[in-house]
Image (spheres, helix red, strand yellow):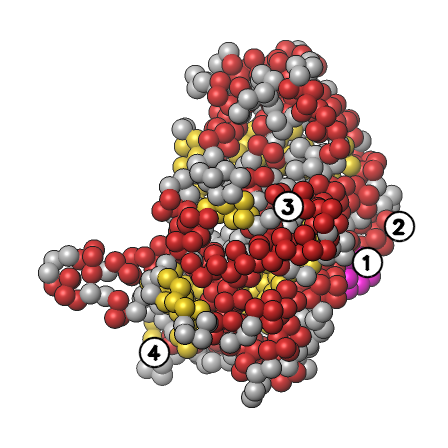
């Protein structure tokens, strides 16, 4: 859309005359339009004689940000005035998704923005599509953190998030004939209209150097290299409240003094900017490859950079609220939550700041630190329980390694003094593990458990496993330290905004929209589950979502899919324990059976579209092979004229939050099929269930609780149970496993080249043999395959009974009330953090 300027300074649009006037808290259509034009004119980032969809998005987003800044300032002042205890949430990941729809939805101004943009000739949904997802996370860990921030704001809790401002994210996924290709994310290629740079909030962060011992015996970390942490704030609005909290992201910067003009003028350009290059590396990429020592050092630098900047900021905020500092009051005003082990270095960093900078004794600093920190464990996978090289830790963070050594020493002394019978268990409990003299490590999870007042799992099954297995010895020392906090999701983003048709039906039948902030009210739908009118409306809403998904799939992949087929979706990070391989092997077997049928037999089959999406970590070979296999199978199946009316297989590229917001409402069956005992919780299962999608899954993570809430008869269960898995693995090692003939058929169908010439022997060999690295089917795909196929047969039969399926779908939504992140965060606030509502009046 072009625009021109008349003599009076007014912009002329195709849609008429709109004068640019700053209206920071606009709610009415005309005011909103004026504020959008104001930003197009006076905070311009583009050529002034054009106003296309991209320009309209940035101007609209900045006009919304005005509103958010006003509320953010009011919230900050309210927290300061009340001097309330605050929670600070430390996470290496935040998977925010697009912000425009969420912001105007939470502010209650969606209709106003839709009408204002319409006056310029644009549809809100088209403008929303111009926004790129913030590339600050990878999977469930980051999405959980973002749901939690939304709930903290909605519940009016005094809380902030801290993270890193990754320029290139994890990666953008492209699918080629060779499989997955990774390219840098471009979300900051232009700029983010939401973030607010805080040039006055800068903290020094040191690496390397040495520990200086002063004459009085105190210690000081000196030397090495020092970079600056610059704050960027992203406002997080609550729903139907004035409270707007902040996600504070840190960017690493070098100063002008670090640029060596002498070297530059001598032609040594790279050497001149050496420090600036080092600074850019820290926040360049999420989870940089760590196969080399430099990669390991960079990852550890990232973690410490987050921890040090955040702790310095927390202490500054604690001090600014009082004229005289009483450190004893610190844990009464500050709660720090560690989201997994990535921010563990916050523990020794707080000790260092309190002792070396604050002048506190060890005992005083330890008492405050212990009362301040709580730790959330997210995994029982051994490779995900971080262990850092002691040599690298000592080299990069010499003072912190000293503090960790002392924590470990005192912990062992405590056990010897108070729990003599447990002394023999210390080798597995101690923080420093030197059992392999060539590779001594620091166990970060152990450091978290020893140093935190509370440790929680994220689903009941997961928490039970933590207490019975992973942290069983610690439970004997601190039986009251361990809690469960089943994860949750925000119903605003994951139902109200992404599935408007279904949301309107829910509000109509419940006769209230209070379910948006009290999700337990969804249980009221159970009364109407058999009602034919509700079922008809429910089916129409689902079809509308499926039609949107049909269009998206065609645009993203070029594949046409049938909205009348069963939409079967598995979208999550690609990992062997999540068993996308089980899914595609089941699909291969389904295709093989279809090929063997007559056309008359095929016409009795439930048509199905299987969609799989997710990113495989760049160096995870088997995960990348799974991605390639899915695409190779789909290329054959989708182009087979005999069967493609009955089966299509689509890999959804570059899965992210915005993609999930299209896939989840359109889903009818979702696969949550991890090996039992290996998924801590999962949250996508909650999103699917909330949107009336039925689940086929194992008794793993939050599946257990979802099945309890929605009813066993509405969940397609299969597979080994968690307590059976160790025995089954042992039996496999002993050669006692006898594979199902259907499992062998599916593998053989791949091996003979049905899906191309690529040799998948390396991938399939992981399912074969009885033992050995990368063999022996550690994730029990072969064992669970028969019961998986049987469960899929039950799905096919249930889908043929439309009334039964719709009732199950309604009951799935009706049983999802427990899985609101509002409930989860309210429990954290009361039972772990000890914080209370601090509402902006």
Residue at (85, 54) in percent of width and height: 524
Residue at disc 3, secondary structure: helix
Against 667, is 71 above or below?
below
What distance separates the C-alpha of mark 3 from that of mark 4? 79 Å
Residue at disc 4, secondary structure: loop
Q: Which secondary structure dominates the residues rendered in magenta?
A: helix
Residue at (53, 57) in percent of width and height: 404
What distance separates the C-alpha of mark 1 from that of mark 2? 12 Å
Which disc number belongs to residue 426? 3
The residue beneath circle 1 is: 521
- Name which of mark 1 and mark 4 comes first in the sequence: 4
The residue beneath circle 4 is: 6
Which disc number belongs to residue 527? 2
Residue at (15, 57) in percent of width and height: 268
Against 409, is 799 above or below?
above
What distance separates the C-alpha of mark 3 from that of mark 1? 48 Å
- Name which of mark 2 and mark 4 comes first in the sequence: 4
Residue 516 position, x and y percent, is 73, 61
Residue at (56, 87) in percent of width and height: 324
Residue 518 part of the magenta-drawn span: yes
Residue 624 position, x and y percent, is 47, 32
Q: Nearer the viewer, mark 2 or mark 4?
A: 2
Along the line of sight, which residue is nearer the eye, 248 or 53?
Answer: 248
Contact flag, marks 3 and 4 (Cβ < 8 Å)? no
Magenta stretch, residue numbers: 506-520
């Amino acid at each position: 859309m072009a625009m021109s300027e008349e003599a009076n300074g007014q912009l002329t649009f195709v849609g008429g005359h709109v004068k640019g006037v700053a209206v920071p808290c606009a709610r009415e259509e005309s005011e909103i339009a004026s504020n959008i034009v104001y930003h197009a004119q006076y905070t311009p980032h583009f050529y002034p004689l054009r106003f296309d969809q991209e320009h309209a998005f940035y101007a609209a987003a900045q006009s919304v940000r005005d509103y958010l800044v006003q509320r953010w300032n009011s919230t900050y002042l309210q927290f300061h005035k009340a001097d309330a205890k605050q929670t600070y949430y430390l996470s290496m990941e935040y998977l925010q998704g697009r912000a425009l729809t969420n912001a105007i939805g939470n502010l209650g101004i969606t209709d106003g923005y839709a009408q204002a943009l319409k006056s310029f000739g644009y549809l809100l949904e088209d403008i929303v599509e111009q926004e790129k997802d913030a590339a600050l996370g990878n999977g469930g860990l980051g999405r959980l953190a973002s749901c939690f921030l939304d709930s903290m704001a909605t519940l009016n809790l005094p809380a902030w998030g801290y993270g890193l401002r990754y320029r290139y994210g994890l990666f953008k996924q492209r699918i080629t004939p060779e499989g997955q290709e990774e390219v840098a994310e471009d979300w900051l290629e232009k700029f983010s209209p939401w973030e607010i740079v805080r040039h006055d909030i800068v903290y020094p962060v040191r690496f390397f150097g040495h520990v200086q011992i002063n004459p009085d015996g105190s210690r000081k970390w000196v030397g090495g290299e020092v970079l600056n942490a610059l704050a960027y704030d992203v406002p997080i609005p609550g729903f139907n409240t004035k409270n707007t909290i902040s996600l504070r992201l840190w960017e690493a910067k070098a100063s002008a003094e670090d640029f060596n003009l002498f070297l530059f003028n001598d032609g040594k350009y790279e050497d001149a900017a050496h420090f600036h290059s080092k600074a850019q590396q820290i926040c360049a990429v999420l989870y940089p490859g760590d196969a080399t020592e430099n990669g390991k050092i960079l990852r550890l630098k990232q973690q410490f950079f987050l921890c040090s900047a955040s702790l310095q900021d927390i202490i500054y905020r604690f001090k600014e609220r009082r004229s005289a500092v009483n450190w004893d009051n610190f844990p009464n005003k500050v709660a720090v939550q560690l989201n997994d082990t990535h921010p563990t270095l916050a523990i020794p960093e707080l000790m260092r700041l309190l002792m070396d900078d604050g002048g506190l004794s060890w005992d005083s600093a330890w008492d405050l630190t212990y009362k301040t920190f709580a730790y959330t464990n997210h995994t029982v996978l051994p490779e995900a329980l971080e262990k850092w090289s002691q040599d690298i830790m000592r080299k990069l963070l010499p003072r912190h390694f000293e503090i960790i050594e002392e924590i470990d020493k005192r912990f062992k002394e405590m056990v010897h003094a108070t729990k003599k019978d447990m002394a023999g268990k210390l080798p597995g409990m101690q923080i420093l593990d030197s059992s392999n003299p060539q590779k001594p490590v620091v166990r970060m999870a152990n450091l978290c458990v020893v140093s935190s007042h509370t440790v929680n799992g994220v689903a009941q099954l997961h928490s039970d496993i933590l207490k019975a297995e992973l942290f069983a010895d610690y439970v004997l020392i601190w039986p009251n330290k361990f809690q469960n906090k089943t994860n949750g999701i925000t119903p605003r983003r994951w139902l109200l905004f992404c599935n408007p048709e279904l949301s309107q039906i829910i509000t109509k039948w419940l006769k209230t929209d209070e379910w948006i902030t009290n999700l337990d009210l969804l249980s009221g739908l159970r009364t109407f589950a058999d009602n034919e009118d509700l079922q008809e409306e429910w089916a129409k809403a689902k079809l509308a979502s499926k039609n949107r998904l049909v269009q998206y799939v065609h645009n993203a992949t070029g594949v046409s899919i049938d909205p009348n087929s069963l939409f079967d979706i598995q979208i999550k990070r690609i990992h062997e324990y999540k068993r996308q391989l089980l899914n595609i092997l089941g699909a291969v077997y389904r295709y093989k059976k279809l090929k063997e049928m007559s056309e008359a037999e095929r016409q009795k089959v439930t048509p199905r579209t299987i969609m799989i999406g997710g990113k495989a970590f760049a160096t995870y070979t088997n995960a990348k092979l799974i991605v390639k296999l899915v695409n190779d199978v789909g290329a054959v199946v989708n182009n087979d004229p005999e069967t493609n009316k009955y089966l299509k297989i689509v890999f959804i590229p570059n899965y992210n939050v915005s993609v999930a917001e299209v896939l989840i409402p359109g889903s009818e069956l979702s696969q949550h099929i991890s090996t039992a005992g290996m998924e801590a919780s999962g949250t996508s299962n909650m999103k699917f269930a909330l949107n009336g999608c039925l689940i086929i899954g194992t008794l793993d993570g939050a599946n257990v609780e979802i099945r309890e809430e929605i009813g066993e008869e509405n969940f397609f269960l299969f597979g080994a149970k968690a307590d059976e898995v160790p025995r089954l693995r042992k039996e496999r090692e002993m050669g006692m496993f006898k594979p199902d003939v259907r499992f062998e058929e599916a593998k053989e169908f791949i091996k003979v080249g049905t899906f191309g010439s690529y040799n998948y022997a390396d991938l399939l060999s992981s399912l074969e043999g009885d033992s050995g690295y990368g063999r022996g089917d550690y994730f029990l795909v072969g064992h669970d395959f028969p019961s998986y196929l049987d469960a899929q047969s039950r799905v096919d039969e249930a889908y043929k009974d439309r009334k039964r399926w719709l009732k199950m779908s309604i009951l799935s939504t009706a049983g999802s009330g427990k899985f609101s992140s509002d409930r989860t965060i309210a429990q954290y606030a009361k039972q772990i953090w000890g914080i209370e509502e601090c509402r902006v009046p």
